[in-house]
Image: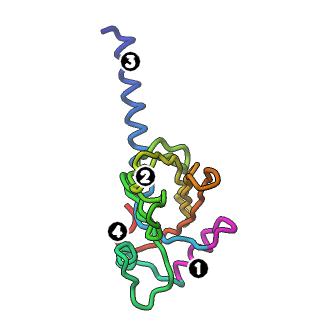
Amino acid sequence: MGLKNAGCIFLAMIAVSAVDNVVASTTTGVFLWYPDKSAPPSSQDCEALVSRVRPSREKAEAWLWGRMPQEAELEFYHFLSESRMEPTFSAEGDYDTGELRLGSSVGDETAFDMIPDDHPSDTIKGSMIAPTESSVVTVILRNVPTTDAPVDRVIYYCRFTDDETEA
């Protein structure tokens, strides 16, 4: 193998390593759903919601398993790992819960493919936008099938501080 080929292989290894690092740095954890869809929330909007709701991982897990915590507001959560996406408000037959395959990141946006649990022959493409300096996490599901025509779904979530809520 010549020096030129060795150099190309070395550069390819660096590129693969960089992509792995980008994917690994994607925001994962538990996030609080922001209910107002009329406009994207600001960090201050998220902070006000978090202050009012007082979310916790314990409450989020109760909602995930169908148990409404005592004295809880109607709050919903989004569980996001490197291999699954699972909101607590998903309905049977919906397209927003399933296996996640993270793609590349550009800036604060990470692409993904999601295979819905209830529609395993479909793949939903989407992206997550999670600026590190903001409390807002935006999830976009593209071309979600509906009875009329495919639509994009944009869902806003708020980060909150609690032990083990964000990886």
Looking at the picture, the colour scheme in use is: rainbow
Alpha carbon separation for disc pair 2 and 1: 36 Å
Marked residue nearer the N-terminal end (3 or 4): 3
Task: Please name the residue shown 62% across and 53% down the image.
Answer: 151
Q: Name the residue under label 1.
A: 48
Magenta span contains residue 48: yes
Label at residue 164: 4
**Extreme residue toward the top, this view:** 2
Marked residue nearer the N-terminal end (3 or 2): 3
For residue 62, side relative to residue 156 (left or right): left
Visible residue check, residue 36: yes
Alpha carbon separation for disc pair 4 and 2: 30 Å
Label at residue 7: 3
Local secondary structure at mark 2: loop
Task: Please name the residue shown 47% across and 82% down the image.
Answer: 54
Q: In this view, does 67 lie above or below 94?
A: below
Image coordinates of residue 10 in percent, x first then y, are: 36, 23
User: Which kind of residue does numbered mark 3 sit on?
Assistant: Gly
Image coordinates of residue 60 in percent, x first then y, are: 40, 75
CB of mark 2 within 8 Å of CB of mark 1?
no
User: Which kind of residue does numbered mark 1 sit on?
Assistant: Ala
Marked residue nearer the N-terminal end (1 or 4): 1
Q: Mark 2 points at which residue?
A: 119
What crowding class fits label 1: few (fewer than 14 Cα within 10 Å), some (14-19), or many (20 or more)?
few
